Amino acid sequence: MTSRVLLVSPAMTASLRQARFDDGAPLDDRGRADARAAAGRLPADALVVTSASIRCQEAAEALGLAPTDSPAELAGMAMGHWRGRSLHEVTASEPEALARWLTDPDHAPAGGESVSSFSARVVRWLDTTAAGEGRLVAVVEPEVVRAAVIHVTGAPPAAFWRLDVEPLTVTELSGRAGRWNLRLGRPVNSL
């Protein structure tokens, strides 16, 4: 069975505008308005899932989607004690740890998750659950999109940090486990 998976990145939050590691913040007013403006553009007959974060849940709702699940594999990357801190704060207090995390896919912040282990759980979801769903819309954190793109293209794990995922864009995967095709980053409001 061929599957079509639309990975939708959520709208902006105040924390993202401040370059903070995810702190569970909801969408800000502008992000909510942007998502509402794009409502009705995604397939109405698709199964919908989300990352468990507030911003993904709110983005799905503002887009007019009704999620049926928040699979654990689609949770954002665990940031450990960096959660809620700004990139500037972490750079100032732990420059070596941050540099290692950005260059070594197997390194994790204290209490957090490495790019490698995070990507493995996203790939597990993609190649098992998503591969059998037909048409699926997943409103997910940008790092979930990055992990899926790395997997689909066969790029090295170090390329994870070289991929930018803009808010409210769609990355489309079609195919099945082990053989995916990729269509990158269309704005939701252009569908």
Image (cartoon, grey):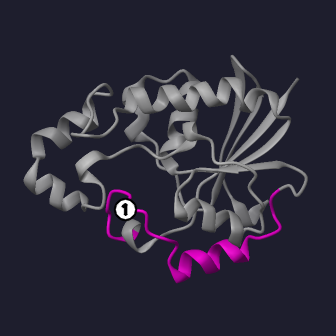
- Residue 47 in percent (x, y) is at 82, 47
- In the depicted structure, whether residue 68 falls above or below residue 113: below
Quarter occupied by the C terminus:
bottom right
- Amino acid at circle 1: Asp
- Residue at left offset 44%, top offset 69%: 25
Kindly indicate the quadrant of the structure image that contains residue 64.
Answer: bottom right
State yes or no: residue 19 in magenta.
yes
Which residue is situated farthest in the top direction here?
A: 178
Give the crowd class for mark 1: few <14, some 14-19, many >=20 residues within 10 Å: some
- Residue at left offset 59%, top offset 25%: 124
- Residue 11 in percent (x, y) is at 56, 66
Q: Is residue 145 visible?
A: no
- Residue 72 in percent (x, y) is at 56, 40
- Residue at left offset 80%, top offset 37%: 4
The boundaries of the magenta stretch are 17-42
Q: Can residue 140 be seen in this view?
A: yes
Give the residue at mark 1. 23
Mostly what secondary structure, the magenta segment? loop
- In the depicted structure, whether residue 70 falls above or below residue 56: above
Q: Does residue 71 appear left or right of residue 174 in this picture?
A: left
